C-alpha cells in the first residue's frame, strides 16, 4: 500500500478528488507495494485505480487521461529497505551521535540504486525482487561488488548468507539489466590478487558491466580500527597498477578504460590524475571518480558566462581531500573572472580529520571556519554537503549557516554554477556586486554509507 502526500492543484488527481492521506491500493487489480508499482502501472493512458480515502471510503476510479497529462500526485517517501550486512568499514556504524536520523539507517535498496545511483550490495534480494528488476527494467543499477570471490565478499560484508555476486550479475545481464559497480578496497582483504580476479570477473560479464570504480576504504575516528586500516601509499599504487592493466585492455578492446581509480586513490598514491578525456562521460563522478577533472571541465565550459569580479575575494570551502587539488582549478577561474580565490580547507570536527570529503563537512565546522572572515566578499560551499532539506550532516540548516557568517554564501557543485548565477544577476541589475542576497540553496542528495 502506498499513500498520497500531496496533490497538485488543478491536476487530474485533484479533479478526481484524491487528497493527501489517500491510500492507493491497486491498479487494474494489481496491488501497489511501492512507488515503482505506481510509476509503472499508472503510466498507461487508461487504468482502474482502487483507492481508500482518509474518510475510509473505498473508490474505484476509471481513469482515462490525455497523453502525458500527469496525475499530479506525490507519494509519501518509501520505507527504505535495510541492509543485511555488517561491514567493518560501515560508515553508518561509525557515525557519532547527533547527526540527522536518516544517517543511522543502513540502506541497501535496489530501488534507490536505480533511482538515485546509490550503491547496493543486492544481498537482500528475494526472487520476486529479481523478477521485478527485470520486469520493470531497472537499469542501470549501481552495485557494490567489493570482491567476486564469494568467501572474501562474505567476509567483507560480514554476511555469511551473501549470495555469489557473479551469477547474480549474470542473471541481470541476461535480463537486459546493466550495472555500474564499485570495489571499496580494504588492505589485506580484497586488494592484490583478489582485486585482479574481481576486475577480470567483472570484465568477463561483458557490456552489461558498464564501469568499475576502485575506491580506498574511508574510515572515521569512530570506525573499527582494530579490524580495518587505511591503505598505505604503496598499496594504493599497487591497486592503480591493476586498474591501469585492465583499463589498458578495455581501451584496446572496447574503446573505453571501463575501470577507474577514484581521485582519492591517486591522491593517496601520490600520483597525478589522468586527463579529463580519460573519464569519458564521468559515469562515477558522484563516487569521487574524475571529480577534479570534471570540475575543470565545467569551469572551462562556463568561461564565457563568468562575471568580472574585479579583485573581489572568494573563499571556496572544501574538505582536506580536495584542498590540495583545488589551487590548480581555481587558477583558471581567477584568470577568467579576475577574482581572488582562497581555498578554505575545513577539518571534519564531527567524524575526525581522517574524513576528508567535502560532502561530509558539518555546517558547524564551516561556520567556525568562516566566522571571522569579514575580508571575504563571497564564500562558495560544497552543495553535496546538504541534503534535500537543505541541512548539513550535523542537522544545521543552510539558511541558519548563511545567517551566522559575515559574507554572502552560495552552495555550489562546481564553482562555475554559482559564479554564473552571480554574473546573470549582476547583468540584470547592472551591478558588479557579489551581493548580500547571494545565498541560494541548491538541492543535492547525500550518499549515505559506502554500500
Ligand atoms: S557499508 Fe553499506 S553494505 Fe556495508 S553494512 Fe554499511 S550500509 Fe551495509
Image (cartoon, rainbow, N blue to C red):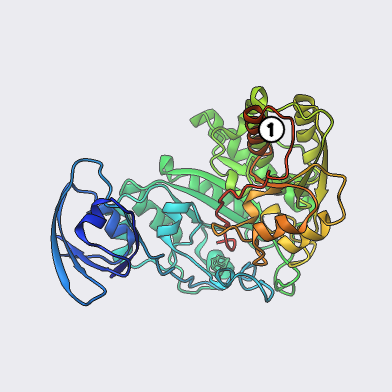
Residue at numbered disc 1:
296
Q: Position of residue 138 (x, y in %)?
A: 35, 51
- Residue 355 shown left or right of residue 147 in the figure: right
Q: Position of residue 424 (x, y in %)?
A: 62, 30
The front one of 426 and 448 is 426
- Residue 354 shown left or right of residue 195 in the figure: right
Q: Is residue 405 above or below residue 210?
A: below
Q: Quadrant of ligand 1?
A: bottom right
Q: Position of residue 327 (x, y in %)?
A: 81, 37
Q: Is residue 353 above or below residue 436?
A: below
Q: Residue at x 42, y 52 (%)?
A: 114
How busy is the neighbourhood of tag 1: few (under 14 within 10 Å), some, or many (20 plus)?
A: many
Q: Quadrant of residue 310?
A: top right
Q: Quadrant of residue 129?
A: bottom left
The front one of 341 and 329 is 341
- Residue 95 shown left or right of residue 368 in the figure: left
Amino acid at each position: 500500500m502506498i499513500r498520497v502526500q500531496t496533490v497538485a492543484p488543478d491536476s487530474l488527481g485533484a479533479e478526481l478528488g484524491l487528497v493527501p492521506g489517500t491510500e492507493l491500493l491497486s491498479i487494474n487489480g494489481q496491488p501497489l507495494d511501492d512507488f515503482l508499482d505506481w510509476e509503472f502501472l499508472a503510466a498507461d493512458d487508461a487504468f482502474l485505480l482502487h483507492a481508500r480515502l482518509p474518510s475510509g471510503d473505498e473508490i474505484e476510479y476509471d481513469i482515462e487521461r490525455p497523453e502525458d497529462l500527469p496525475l499530479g500526485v506525490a507519494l509519501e517517501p518509501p520505507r527504505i529497505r535495510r541492509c543485511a550486512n555488517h561491514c567493518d568499514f560501515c560508515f553508518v556504524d561509525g557515525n557519532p551521535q547527533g547527526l540527522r536520523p536518516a544517517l543511522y539507517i543502513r540502506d541497501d535498496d535496489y530501488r534507490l540504486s536505480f533511482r538515485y545511483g546509490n550503491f547496493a550490495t543486492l544481498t537482500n534480494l528475494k526472487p520476486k525482487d529479481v523478477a521485478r528488476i527485470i520486469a520493470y527494467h531497472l537499469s542501470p543499477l549501481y552495485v557494490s561488488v567489493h570482491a567476486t570471490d564469494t568467501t572474501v565478499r562474505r567476509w567483507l560484508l560480514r554476511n555469511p548468507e551473501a549470495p555469489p555476486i557473479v551469477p547474480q550479475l549474470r542473471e541481470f545481464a541476461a535480463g537486459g539489466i546493466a550495472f555500474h559497480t564499485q570495489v571499496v578496497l580494504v588492505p589485506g582483504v580484497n586488494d592484490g590478487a583478489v582485486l585482479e580476479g574481481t576486475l577480470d570477473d567483472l570484465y568477463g560479464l561483458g557490456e552489461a558491466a558498464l564501469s568499475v570504480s576502485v575506491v580506498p576504504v574511508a574510515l572515521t575516528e569512530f570506525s573499527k580500527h582494530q579490524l580495518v586500516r587505511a591503505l598505505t601509499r604503496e598499496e594504493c599504487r599497487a591497486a592503480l597498477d591493476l586498474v591501469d592493466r585492465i583499463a589498458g585492455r578495455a581501451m584496446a578492446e572496447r574503446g573505453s578504460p571501463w575501470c577507474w581509480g577514484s581521485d582519492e586513490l591517486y591522491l593517496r598514491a601520490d600520483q597525478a590524475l589522468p586527463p579529463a578525456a580519460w573519464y569519458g562521460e564521468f559515469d562515477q563522478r558522484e563516487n569521487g571518480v574524475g571529480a577534479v577533472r570534471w570540475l575543470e571541465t565545467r569551469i572551462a565550459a562556463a568561461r564565457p558566462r563568468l562575471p568580472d569580479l574585479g579583485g573581489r575575494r572568494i573563499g571556496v570551502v572544501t574538505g582536506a581531500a580536495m584542498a590540495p587539488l583545488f589551487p590548480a582549478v581555481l587558477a583558471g577561474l581567477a584568470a577568467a573572472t579576475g577574482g581572488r580565490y582562497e581555498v578554505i580547507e575545513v577539518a571534519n570536527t564531527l567524524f575526525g580529520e581522517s574524513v576528508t570529503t567535502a560532502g561530509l563537512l558539518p555546517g558547524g565546522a564551516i561556520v567556525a571556519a568562516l566566522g571571522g572572515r569579514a575580508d571575504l566578499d563571497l564564500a562558495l560551499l560544497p552543495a553535496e554537503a546538504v541534503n534535500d532539506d537543505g541541512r548539513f550532516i550535523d542537522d544545521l540548516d543552510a539558511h541558519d549557516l548563511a545567517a551566522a557568517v559575515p559574507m554572502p554564501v552560495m552552495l555550489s557543485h562546481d564553482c562555475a554554477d554559482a559564479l554564473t548565477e552571480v554574473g546573470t544577476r549582476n547583468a540584470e541589475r547592472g551591478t558588479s556586486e557579489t551581493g548580500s542576497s547571494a545565498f541560494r540553496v541548491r538541492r543535492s542528495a547525500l550518499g549515505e554509507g559506502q554500500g
